[in-house]
Amino acid sequence: MRLLKESQPEFVSGEVLCKELGVSRTAVWKHIQALRAEGYDILSQQNAGYRLVGVPDRLYPQEILSGLKTEFIGRHIFYYPQAPSTNILARDLALSGAPDGALVVAEEQTGGRGRLGRGWFSPCGKGVWCSLILYPSVNPAAAPPLTMLTAVAVARAVQQAAGLVPGIKWPNDLLLGGKKICGILTEMSAEIERINYLIIGTGINVNLNGEDFPEEIRDSAASLKMFTGRDVSRIKLLQAYLQEMEQLYRIWLEEGFSPVLELWKEICVTLRRPVRVSSLKESVEGWAEDVDEEGNLILRLENGALRKFVAGEVSLRPF
Amino acid sequence: MRLLKESQPEFVSGEVLCKELGVSRTAVWKHIQALRAEGYDILSQQNAGYRLVGVPDRLYPQEILSGLKTEFIGRHIFYYPQAPSTNILARDLALSGAPDGALVVAEEQTGGRGRLGRGWFSPCGKGVWCSLILYPSVNPAAAPPLTMLTAVAVARAVQQAAGLVPGIKWPNDLLLGGKKICGILTEMSAEIERINYLIIGTGINVNLNGEDFPEEIRDSAASLKMFTGRDVSRIKLLQAYLQEMEQLYRIWLEEGFSPVLELWKEICVTLRRPVRVSSLKESVEGWAEDVDEEGNLILRLENGALRKFVAGEVSLRPF
């Protein structure tokens, strides 16, 4: 694959492939057949050899790893054409000792999950549905900041890979034109003073068309393609996300949440605005004054008092 | 069993048993044989019937349920003569939908676990090694208070069942004479804004003799028996614990942590004293000023500043 890619758009002779790989002509031919079965378009021509014409729109590990500039995030990849939910698979993999930074990625989720038991629409080949397995040696209170860090990583990746600038809605929803383009579901197994493992699931709507979305979410959800007008490379987006994650995660490990929070605030669109915060129990209106070092939303109520929110659904309201 | 217990120390005739249970004499005899195999000492006498002489020192579900005054805590019991760790079994049971308040109990743990990956010595029949499965609809920040609530429940149960008054060392160690008699290991599976399930594991050292403990913990651990001088009923202790848990859990659900925290403070022996707080990273000395509503320890440092601790190991130091 590497040889074919490097020679593109030229041919690589069968002889060179044999020599470099140290295998027979028949073995080379068998490999080419296997690649074709995976969707690679490879031209073969007598006396010229093989030429790579097209790469399939698939999140194959070799494609993700090719050119990926990270040290541990996404270096181990578990790839599934179809999965019930990458978070569930990631949990099982974490329990069986998957390495730090391992990535679980699926072309399609049949039971994609969002926060609070909601679903996440994850059709085949149209998005980046993936989960990262991390083992930060911190206590569970550090989990909300890590989710916010992830939102920053995705926002920056979207900017790099699609040239779009999304906004963050506290704590970690990514919006374009007021519609949700990415959801993050962080799950953990923890004791009181330490996290055993953390699973960060992200669903990024990449190449769905408006009509692909189920009717009930068509008003609230969107994809990158709906804003770019053309397909966005899922591989490039995923690579950018992994790279941003590693960079931000390192900053967080070394310097704490403050510098990451500053980046988050720059992208946030629900700060210093009148908002409504809804939880399972209540709905409160106020002014989104600030977000503290633990990721809590500080709301100034009508009566001037400050109130801290650990969780909740924020919606903007008119001034 | 109920009929035999109610008639104690008198005999119950085979005829009464047949009638009440609606089965044949042979069936009654088979049941009696089965109970004997479980360790019940039952006398049978021609023309008189059956008499219960002795109940085995086992945490059988029927014994726990007999006289238990709770509505949901401990109403479902998973009993194991031997388990690797009740917390691990409880996790699997929670994942397969065990009901709220379900109890997992074992006579012996072969891989009993304590906090931070430490072990917990759990010899057969000598302690109460158990785990509760709970599904509180709260966010993960509520977990430390629930662990402290559990410490209060165990302390009160020890007082009822053994007449001893233990002290709490922040956040949830129970001490008698400065030695640890109970450990609590809370584990959870959670998202950012909600707990999926919570496992509260408790190990209470009941009837171990001093020499039963492995040498390396003989200085720091003790059992109830070492203070009472005689065996304590594990069944009564466990029942008292379950009842206290349900009562405190209800208060917490209805009124929040404040009233429970007040009870906790009364039993705490590391408040308003000079202490050292050690974590994986550091060791800090100061005055244990207070514990806040989230269960954090507020330490006043030498320089007068206040510092909040989410976790750590507290040791008392001389004034």
Image (tube, coloured by chain):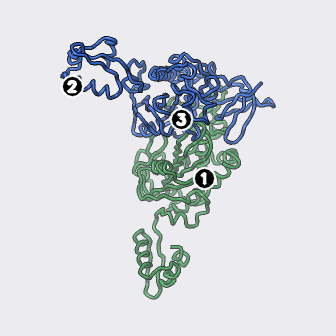
Chain colours: A green, B blue
Mark 3 lies on residue: B121
Q: Tell me the SS state at disc 1.
A: helix
Front residue of B273 and B213: B213
Mark 1 lies on residue: A153
Which residue is situated farthest in the right direction here?
Answer: B303
Front residue of A275 and B69: B69
Image point (27%, 14%), residue name: B12
The answer to whether residue B134 is visible is no
Badges 3 and 1, same chain: no
In-image side of B215 versus B80 (left or right): right
Image point (61%, 50%), residue name: A152
Select label 3 or label 1 by which is in front. Answer: 3
Where residue B238 sits: x, y (%)?
47, 23
Residue B114: image tag: none
Mark 2 lies on residue: B27
The answer to which quarter of the image holds residue B274 is: top right
Q: Tell me the SS state at disc 2.
A: helix
Q: Are marks 3 and 1 in contact (CB under 8 Å)?
A: no
In-image side of B112 versus B273 (left or right): left
